[in-house]
Image (cartoon, rainbow, N blue to C red):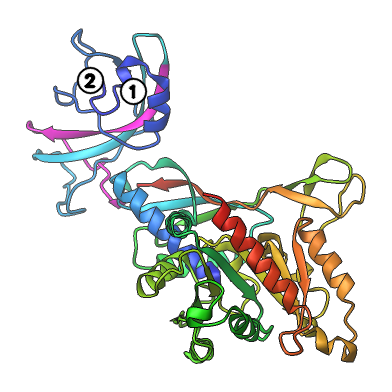
Amino acid sequence: MHEVSLATALLDLVQEQAAAAGARRVTRLVLEIGALSHVDPHALRFAVDAAALGGPAEGATLEILEPEGTAYCLDCESSVAVSTRGALCPSCGGAKLLIQGGDEMRLKEMEVV
Amino acid sequence: MCGICGCGQGEKRVEDLHHGEPHDHPHPIDELHANSADRDHDHSHEHAAAHDHRHEPAGSHAHAESDHGHDHEHAHWHEHSHTHPDGITHSHPHSHEHRHAQEHECGNRNVNGPSADATRVLSVERDLLAHNDAVAAQNRRDFQAAKTLTLNLVSSPGSGKTTLLVETLKRIGRGVDAKYPIAVIEGDQETTADAERIRATGAPAIQINTGKGCHLDADLVRTAMGRLEIPANGILFIENVGNLVCPAGFDLGEAHKVVVVSVTEGEDKPLKYSGMFAASALMVVTKIDLAPHLDIDIDRLIDNARRINPTIGVLRLSAKSGEGMDRWMHWLETARALRLATD
């Protein structure tokens, strides 16, 4: 359950940003959790809800964007979209894919009052 | 002109950096928003609907049906757009502090309540692991300064990490006869059993108990670094908590992650726990002395690992029989030599 660590890190970041903005309450969080990141969005949701209790982000809506994975195929030398690590190249069926994107875990924006 | 960002000067770069964050535009004249000539930019704003005024404390006074007068201060948010001297128009939310010195009329249409403020959206764009990554970078700088090769050993529980380490440390030697300086940071949820096994070889070791935590993080390693001498020109082994999922995302400042997989775990581990194999530079297949008793196809295990990470290095060994240990020791010495050869 490293989602708990991530949720704690997220809420630290949220509190810091809210304080800097002079906000009293956080009503919405927009996260970007790439399809190839090592986070389960469902577990993260659960962890964030629990970790936010008693703080300015308690009850905030959590919006999770899941950008798709992108990879470079060493066989056909092209950039392709992949849904999981270990997937075969959708254009040539090759197995040597270097992951290039879709593993991000970011706090994109937050809505505050 | 905005006193914080100087946005009246129309510097777009600053504006983009700054206007994600809220700030006040104070007005010298209460309430009026008249665009007199001494202002640096013009404001046009409108309240789309009757807007709410927040009273502090909320609801502390009631408005009778009949109009009445009172004094109060309040703040409210609204969108405004303005035009800079260079012609760039932009809009952003801002707040006004108002002091009502004069009486105003509050009829029963006056709405007071806690939902009085408008919302703002802050653009953040920060990595969730930003703190961990910053501490890891600090650790990495310290390791580089000491020319220490730091390896983060990761695996599922029971893969043989500690046994591999014990056999490795015996081969490196102890005290003045040691080939190079070594130290071990042991991560486990509970017990100091592993650190004791390591210390029995004569190597300095410190245990980190993560309690309920499923992985080491850069802060924990930094704390351990303060209590253990970093082996200058040598190798620091960090044995992570046995877990093929969570430690993948947490950079500790290591030079490489080394994933340890035993032949008893089956050949599909890389596909099931791809994050870890993607993050590792080397896969060590352990317990190969057991392979004849199992159905495992080690070549397929390696193919699967390379499907996740085409550049991953692979070693096969048995810490128990000693088979393959020479190649592992050679890999360590080569990686250490590279560490020493470069800044």
B28 shown above or below B311: above
Residue B334 coordinates in the image, percent (x, y): 66, 62
Res A97 seen here:
yes
Q: Residue at x 30, y 14 (%)?
A: B42
Tell whether position B210 is magenta. no
The residue marked by circle 2 belongs to what chain?
B
Does B58 sit left or right of B17 as displayed?
left
Q: Judge by depth and name the residue closer to the eye, B282 or B203.
A: B203
The amino acid on which the numbered mark 2 sits, given as a three-letter code, is: His
Q: Which mark is residue A55?
A: none
- Which residue lies under the disc numbered 1? B45
Question: Within 10 angstroms of label 2, few (less than 14), some, or many (20 or more) residues?
Answer: few
B272 shown above or below B124: below
Q: Judge by depth and name the residue closer to the eye, B183 or A43.
A: B183
Q: Residue at x 69, y 67 (%)?
A: B331
- Which residue lies under the disc numbered 2? B33
What stretch of residues is rendered in magenta? B89-114
The residue marked by circle 1 belongs to what chain?
B
- CA gap, disc 1 to disc 2? 9 Å
Q: Judge by depth and name the residue closer to the eye, B101 or A43.
A: A43
Tell whether position B113 is magenta. yes
Find the residue positioned furthest to the front: B177
Residue B175 coordinates in the image, percent (x, y): 48, 82
Res A39 seen here:
no
Residue B36 coordinates in the image, percent (x, y): 20, 10
B300 shown above or below A37: below
Residue B54 coordinates in the image, percent (x, y): 23, 45
Does B141 sit left or right of B214 as displayed?
left
- For marks 1 and 2, the one nearer the N-term is 2
Q: Residue at x 66, y 79 (%)?
A: B156
